[in-house]
Image (cartoon, helix red, strand yellow):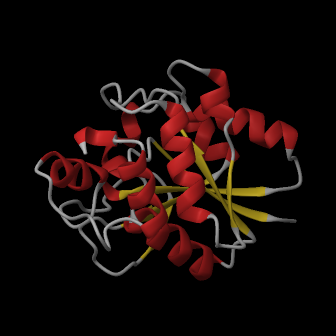
Amino acid sequence: MKKIGILGGAFNPPHIGHLLIAEYVRDELILDEVWFVPTYESPHKENTTVSAKHRLAMLKCAIKDHPHFFIHTIEIDRKGKSYTIDTIRTFTKDFPTYEFFFIIGADMVEYLPNWKDVDELFELITFVGVKRHEFTLQTSYPILTVEIPKINISSTLVRERLKKNRSITYLVPNAVENYIKENHLYGH
């Protein structure tokens, strides 16, 4: 049975923190692969200013050299808002012999009671919570936790630095930084 980590998000843009989380969880839980699942439109966040096409291209740049990282475009292909339950129902139907581990930050752990069909989700997958600097991992739901090095990088931080024409070197992979510059994203 393959063990698959799923890391969803807007990836607006993808940054080193995303990769660090994916790799630490992969290594700690001895996962075969981590699937990055970019949203077309997140139900938890405001609309993104960068198209799904660009976010997908940046994500491809970010993970291209990692042999265990893959992208699934199920939510981009679906268009509109995507809910985790719809994606997981599809994955468990299409890959019935796989075991899925859904990776979330502590900010999302606190928000779990508000997720659509959250009780069904817990029947289908295992949630893995990773600590974020300003959040705790307290919940009544059964989740695995993985300790990662404290790294306070977010897509918001990257976008804010770009708006101020500040460096994002070492916050994102070089290929992502180059893609942002070449395509004049985030006001750069």
Residue visible at 14% across and 53% down in the picture: 165
Q: Is residue 171 left or right of residue 19?
A: left
Q: Position of residue 137 (x, y in %)?
A: 32, 62
Residue visible at 33% across and 29% down in the picture: 49
Residue visible at 37% across and 65% down in the picture: 172
Q: Nearer the viewer, residue 117 or 17?
A: 17
Vertical relation: 28 (above or below) 38: below
Q: Position of residue 152 (x, y in %)?
A: 23, 68
Q: Position of residue 120 (x, y in %)?
A: 62, 35
Q: Can the viewer see residue 145 in this picture?
A: no
Q: Nearer the viewer, residue 159 or 40?
A: 159
Q: Position of residue 187 (x, y in %)?
A: 23, 39
Residue at the extreme left of the image, as rendered: 164
Q: Can the viewer see residue 170 in this picture?
A: yes
Residue 3 occupies quadrant: bottom right
Q: Quadrant of the N terminus?
A: bottom right
Q: Quadrant of the C terminus?
A: top left
Vertical relation: 46 (above or below) 11: above
Q: Is residue 45 left or right of residue 77?
A: left
Q: Nearer the viewer, residue 157 or 75?
A: 157
Residue visible at 40% across and 68% down in the picture: 16
How many numbered marks appear? 0
Q: Nearer the viewer, residue 183 or 69?
A: 183
Vertical relation: 152 (above or below) 124: below
Residue at the extreme top of the image, as rendered: 80
